[in-house]
Structures are given as structure tokens and as C-alpha cells.
Image (spheres, rainbow, N blue to C red):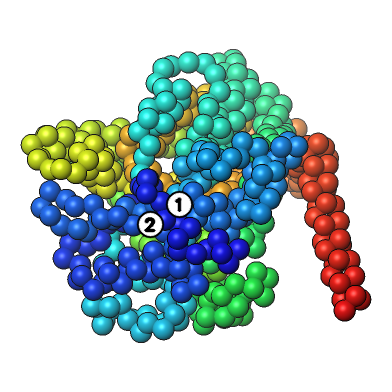
Amino acid sequence: MAESWSFLDTFESNFRPLVVIELAKGTKKETIEWFTKRIVDKKANGGAQLLVKPLVTEKGEENIYLVGASHLRLLLGAETVGLVKECNDNSMRTFTYSSRKTFRDFADDNHNFLTMAECQYIIKHELENLRAKDEKMIPGYPQAKLYPGKSIVRRLLTSGILVQIFPLHDREELKKLRHSWYGRVKVGYQPLDEIRCYFGETIALYFGFLEYFTFALVPMAVIGIPYYVFAWEDYDKYVMFATFNLLWSTVILEVWKRICAIVTYRWGTLLMKRQFEEPRPGFHGVLGINPVTGREEPVYSSIKRQIRIYLVSLPFVCLCLYFSLYVMMIYFDLEQWALDYHEENESNFSSLMLFVPSIIYAVVIEIMNRIYRYAAEFLTSWENHRLESSYQNHLILKVLVFNFLNCFASLFYIAFVLFDMKLLRQSLATLLITSQILNQFAESLLPYWLQKRHKKRMKKRMSSLKTDTDLTLVEQINLEKEMGTYFGTFDDYLELFLQFGYVSLFSCVYPLAAVFAVLNNITEIYSDALKMCRVYKRPFAEPTANIGVWQLAFETMSVISVVTNCILIGMSPQVNALFPDSKMDLILTVALVEHLLLAIKFIMAFVIPDKPRDIQIKLAKLEFESLEALKQQQMKLAAESLKE
């Protein structure tokens, strides 16, 4: 292995650009020389051992650099990050360079063994793990302090020296993907394997979940239409619909776990272990040795992290939730004031005043969401999580709780305080349909239109440019670096989560919610595919084995939906008529039904295995083989020691 890491092994005459680094214009020469030297330097000297080539712009500036790597370097990097590939015996195993011949489709001259997304992920991993050793500051910028273990890329970004790092698109592969994905309207499944090869597992798994969730909504939509048409005010008939809804929400989430396990096993990410996950770029601490991997990395006390979470972050989140509820109560007071004013005056002006509280509340909610999002990101970063997955999970939980309260608190208040079912139905329909229209416009249509305008201007400017550099590559980089940045699947999952809440929480009040959700998701698949291929820069691939904390979020929502639907049915006049003498009997009956449904729900979740039987056997077999290999290695070492 030591010989394989030598600098000569990473030399490659046919340079293939994979990642673009954009530095700020006017960056000092000594800074550029130091940074590029760290990128190409040997691993033993704390470098990344990659290849770098400057891209000269039309003004002769050298603030854009292309990063690549030799085939051997990428293979060694694949072993470092723990990529899992398919072997010749159809099993999935963690790739190691020493056993490379046992992997399917491997050949020394086959540079397509690793997908372009995997190569870019490896380069990103190496760049993010460039850490300061003896440097006290960034050369040329004494105010940008460094200390041992600090991420160099992170410090360059926060100091404004590094503008961005992004992976390049493969235009030929992207063209093929666009054609098979959304190039024509068709009834069929998405090309998830192709999406995974191009964008990585995280994005492919989101589109897989979106497709699955859309198909799962179809039964609810089909059943909801006749309930809406023929039994609008008959709450007795809604009991069966609500019961089906509750069982449906459990089954689809459990079945998704099985589908997710099948897909991620085929992709290899189900086998990737957490110990292969390197510290996130923002993680800081004293440089030490990881006791698991034996590698040098920052070390930070978990006790300090827990203190920050429970004594600072948790109280802050609770305070924000209280403030959100306080603002909601002010909104309802304003609504009542506007209604009283209209009843007293009954003029055109008073009619317009009825809309003022809703407008003010919507603006305040949007402002609160944005401020809270920034605060949540700051707090989660300040908590100093070692792993990116841990950071994302804590951030998602913070934002999720606040968004849930903002979107559904007013509906709960209308249902269980005002007891106004007509207003609840109207508010639910308005919130669902309006949010879907606004999301489609803001997330896809508007960015696509702006990107198209920018692309036309850029092409005109590039057509008049005279340079000896590869014009196609220059044009591509200049177009892509101005594209928007895709910040992950958080907002996409959040939209589906809120949609799931609208469908499941108040199903007995508005059965058509599933119909509008299906129609929205069909267009969402195409609009999200469009924005990934045409609007945003190509994101770095991120391996994942599941949808993470979102699975828990959806399951929690389904439990809450049991409670809300049981209470709503218990509040109906038809059910109340069955208990004319004792309200306590009504409450006990509703509680009994709720507990019975929850019991059925948890039993179903327990009975349905998270992984299919064949996947369980394959995983157990791999674990057994690993233990046997370890045992043989120990026996070999023991035999050698006896000989001595």
C-alpha cells in the first residue's frame, strides 16, 4: 500500500476534470500556490494526492481550477471511503484494492468501473479532509487563523477565499438521462438506477420514495372520491374511511422499508458502515487518533456536545415553539376583530379587512420560518457533530418540529377549540392546494426561467470570445458555476411530509386531499427532474442506506393521525347521538377505539419485517464470512508467533 500511494502512481497524462474549484478573484498568489500544493501533495505529507489544472478565463485570470485524479488514486480512494461493489459471485462486498480482481467488470484499463458520481464523491471526500497540521494561518491572509485539525476547505470558505466547489456535469450522460427520465410523458417507473449512477444514492432514493408514495396514495384517492361525492356530511360512513386510512399509513411505511432495503442492497449502500463516514468539514477539535479506524482526525468530547444540545438548543427550540403559538393566538384575535368590525359596518372596506389578518399572519410565518431556519443551522453547527448524518438528523428534527407547528397548529385549533368542521375543511383544502401551487412555481418554474435567461446571455458572450482554450469546456464551466446550488433533499422531503399530514391527519374531514396529492406528485416528479438536470449545479453524490430521520417523522405523523381522526369522529353529531346521557362513556369509547387502532398499528409494524428474508440471509452470510476471515487471520498470527 505504501508504494501505491507514491506521487508517481497518481500521474496521468490524460487529465479528466471532475470537480471545479472557484477561488475569489484577486486571491493572493501565495495562497493559491499553498492550496494547490496541499491538493497535489502526498498523503503522507497531509495532502490529497490529486491532480489540479488551472482554467484561464477570458480576462486571463486563474481563479478557477479543475481537479481530477488518476485511475489508481480513485481506486485507492474507493477503498478509503468504503464503497461497496458487486463481486463476480453476485455478492456485494466492500471494495479493497488488493482484491480488485474479484469484483465484477473490473479491469486495469476499465475506467468506468467507478461511476463519475463515485469519482467525484471520492475527490470531495479527500478535499474536505485536508486539515491543517503546523500552519497557524492561511498564507497571505493572517486574519484567517488555522489550528491543527481544522478543515482547510472550511476555513477558506468562511474566509471568502474559496467561493465554491462543485462537480462537473457529463453532458452526454445527462442528455441520455433527461431523455429516459422526463424527456417524454409516459406511464412507467423512473430510471432509478440511472439516476443513482449520475446523482448518487441520496437523490435517487428521494425520487424512489416520491414515486412509491404517489402510487401508495392512489387507493386513498380512489376511495376518497365517492366518499366526497356521496357521503359529504355523513360522518358514520367516514369511520370506515378513517380506519382504512390509519391502516394504510402503517402498511405503506413498513413496505417502504422493505423496498428501500432491496434497492440499497443492490446499490451497495446498505452494507456501508458508519465507521467509514469521515468527520464532516465543519467538525473541529484537538487533532487525535480515531480509536476505531486508527486514523488521525479531530477529537471532541461527546459530553460537551450533549451539554450544548440539552442546555442550549433544546430550550431555544421550546422557546420558539411557544412564540409560534403566541403569534397564532394573536392571529385568531385579529380574525375575530376583523369579523366583528365587518358585522358592525358591513361595507366594502370592512369586507377587505377580513383578509388582512390572514395576509399578516402568512407574512409573519414566512419571516419566522426563515429566521428559525438560520438559527437552527447555526445551533446545529455550534453543537459540533462529528458526522454529517448526525448533523443532518439534528437539523431536520429542529426544523421539522417548528414547521409542523406552523402548518398544522391553526388546523388543530379550529378542530379542537373552535369545533368548526366547515372552517376546518375549507382551511385544509386552501392550505393544501395553495401550498402545492406555490411550491411548484417557486421550486421549479421560476428557477428554470431565470436559468434559461442566464444561459442565453452566457452563450452570446462566449460566442464572441476568442481563446485557444477548449471553448466547450470553458462555456460549460461558466454556465454551471452561475447555476443555483442544490442544498439537498430536505425541502423536498419536508413537502412530502406536510402533504402526508394533510392527507392522514384530517382524512375524515376532507377525503379529496389524497386526490390533489396524487395530481401534485405526478407533476412534482417531472418538475423535480427538470430542476435537477437543468436548473441546479450537479450536486455531489452522497451514499445513504435509507431516508434517515424522515422515516421516523412519517411514522410519528401516522401515530398522531390515529389520535386526531378518532377525536374528530367522536366529535361528530352522529356519534354524539349514540351517547345522549353520558359524555364520559363517549370519551372512554373513543379512547378505547384509539388504543385498539394504535395496538393494531404497532402489531402490523412488528409483524412486517424491515428487510426481506433473502436480504437478511445475504447480510448474515457476509457477517459470517467476515468473522471467519478474522478468525483465520488470528490463527495465522498465532501460528507465526509459535514458530518464533
Question: At 49% across and 68% down in the image, what residue appears?
Answer: 43
**Residue tagged 1:** 70
In the image, residue 150 lies at what x, y percent?
Answer: 43, 76
Q: Nearer the viewer, residue 154 or 560?
A: 154
Q: Nearer the viewer, residue 548 or 292?
A: 292
**Which mark is first along the chain, 2 or 1?**
2
Mark 2 surroundings within 10 Å by alpha-carbon count, few (fewer than 14), some (14 through 19), many (20 or more): many
Residue 179 in view (yes/no): yes
Q: Is residue 486 left or right of residue 64?
A: right
Contact? badges 1 and 2 (CB < 8 Å) = yes
| Quadrant in which the C terminus appears | bottom right
Question: At 15% across and 57% down in the image, what residue appears?
Answer: 61
Find residue 342 and report its image quarter. top left
Label 2 secondary element: strand
Amino acid type of the residue tagged 1 in the rendering: Ser
**Residue tagged 2:** 51
Residue 588 in view (yes/no): no
Q: Would you place residue 37 above or below residue 210 in this image?
A: below
Label 1 secondary element: loop
Question: At 16% across and 65% down in the image, what residue appears?
Answer: 26
Q: Nearer the viewer, residue 638 or 533?
A: 638
Mark 1 surroundings within 10 Å by alpha-carbon count, few (fewer than 14), some (14 through 19), many (20 or more): many
Q: Would you place residue 99 above or below residue 531 in this image?
A: below
Find residue 446 and report its image quarter. top left
Q: Is residue 593 left or right of residue 60?
A: right
Measured Cα–Cα span from mark 1 to mark 2: 8 Å
Question: At 53% across and 38% down in the image, what residue appears?
Answer: 110
In the image, residue 410 lies at what x, y percent?
Answer: 47, 47
Amino acid type of the residue tagged 2 in the rendering: Leu
